[in-house]
Amino acid sequence: MIYEGTLSAKGLKLAIIVGRFNSMVTESLLGGSEDAIRRHGGDLDDTDIVYVPGAYEIPLTAQVLAQKGTYDAIICLGAVIKGSTDHYDHVASEAAKGIASVSLNENVPVIFGVLTTQTTEQALERAGLKAGNKGYEAAMAAIEMASVLQTIQ
C-alpha cells in the first residue's frame, strides 16, 4: 500500500508559532505561511498564531500546543542569524532539537520553519525576497504531513 498526503488545507486546524526576534524576517515568513494556507483551501480563522520572544522559546510553546490535542499540525517560524559569538550555534541547535522532539513525542507534525543563516541578507532572501518564502514551504509541509498522517491513521 502507498500512503500519500494531499495539499488541501480545507478543514485543518493549524497553529503557527512566530519568534519576534528578527521580526522583519519572521513577519515575512508568517505572511508566506498564511498565503499557503489560503491558497490551498484553508481558513485562517482555523489557524492560531502564537508569538514568542525568539527561536529558543518555540519548542516549549510547540509542546504545550501539541498537548492540547486540537491541532493537525504546528508550524514553527523563526530566524537565527549568525553574529560574532557562539550564541547562534546554541540557539539554532536547541531550537532544531526541541522542535523535532516535540513532533516525535506528541505525534503531531511540528514543522521546522526556523531560518539559520549567516547574514540578515540571506534571511531576507529566504523570507520572500529572492529565494522563495520558507514560511510558505513550511506551511505546505504542515498541510501535507497532516494529511498523510490522517490517511495512515
Image: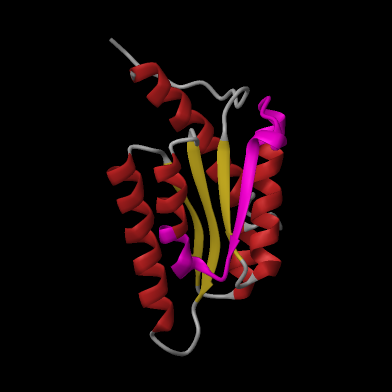
| On screen, residue 128 above or below 111 | below
| On screen, residue 82 above or below 125 | below
| On screen, residue 31 above or below 1 | below
Q: Residue at x 66, y 52 (%)?
A: 30
Q: Residue at x 56, y 44 (%)?
A: 15
Q: Is residue 79 left or right of residue 49?
A: left
Residue furthest toward the front? 68
Image quarter for residue 39? top right
Point out the stretch of residues depicted in magenta: 37-60
The residue lying toward the viewer, choosing from 128 and 35, is: 35
Within the magenta stretch, is there residue 46? yes
The residue lying toward the viewer, choosing from 12 and 122, is: 12
Image quarter for residue 29? bottom right
Within the magenta stretch, is there residue 108? no
The residue lying toward the viewer, choosing from 7 and 99, is: 99
| On screen, residue 117 above or below 97 | below
Find residue 94 and report its horizontal and vertical position in percent.
35, 67
Q: Is residue 33 left or right of residue 141?
A: right
Find residue 51 and report its horizontal and vertical position in percent.
61, 61
Split into 4 quadrants, where in the image is the N terminus? top left
Q: Residue at x 52, y 47 (%)?
A: 75
Find residue 5 and report its horizontal and vertical position in percent.
45, 22
Q: Does the image show residue 92?
A: yes
Find residue 40 and report its horizontal and vertical position in percent.
66, 27
Colour mode?
A: secondary structure
Q: Does the image show residue 130?
A: no
